[in-house]
Amino acid sequence: MRYNKYSKVDKKREEFPQGMIVHVRNDNVEKAIKVLKKKLLKAGVFQELRERQYYESKGTKRRKAKAAATRRYKRKMQKRFEEHGY
């Protein structure tokens, strides 16, 4: 059997656009913009833009990641101490 690059799966992919979709209902563009902003925030687009604004060396990225991990750990331990007392 020969491989067909135009199979049914490929046709289905062409029907749906790639990326993020926000539907505008009742001509309410402001609401659609709020929904889009929320989706972009959840996807981390704004954070990535902020990170890419200036060049950061690998060492700086590593130090920031380590500091963030330390903060997460301390927060977790503080929460555990408050809930369980140890």
Image: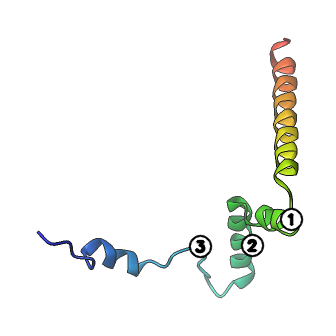
**Image point 87% across, 43% down: which residue?**
63
Secondary-structure class at tag 1:
loop
Q: Percent x, y for residue 77?
A: 84, 23
Spatial CA distance of label 1 from label 3 is 27 Å
Spatial CA distance of label 2 from label 1 is 30 Å
The count of marks equals: 3
**Image point 70% across, 59% down: which residue?**
42
Secondary-structure class at tag 2:
helix
Mark 1 residue crowding within 10 angstroms, few (<14) / some (14–19) / many (20+): few
Q: Earlier in the sequence, mark 2 or mark 3?
A: 3
The quarter of the picture where the C terminus appears is: top right
Q: Percent x, y for residue 24?
A: 62, 82
**Image point 87% across, 46% down: which residue?**
64
Residue at the disc numbered 1: 55
Q: Percent x, y for residue 60?
A: 88, 50
Image-quadrant location for residue 36: bottom right
* Kind of residue sitting beneath label 2: Lys
Secondary-structure class at tag 3:
loop
Q: Nearer the viewer, residue 80 or 34?
A: 80
**Which of labels 1 and 3 is toward the front?**
1
Can you name the residue that lies furthest to the left here? 1
Q: Does 4 sit above or below residue 59?
A: below
**Which of labels 2 and 3 is toward the front?**
3
Residue at the disc numbered 2: 34
Spatial CA distance of label 2 from label 3 is 14 Å
Contact (CB < 8 A) between labels 2 and 1? no
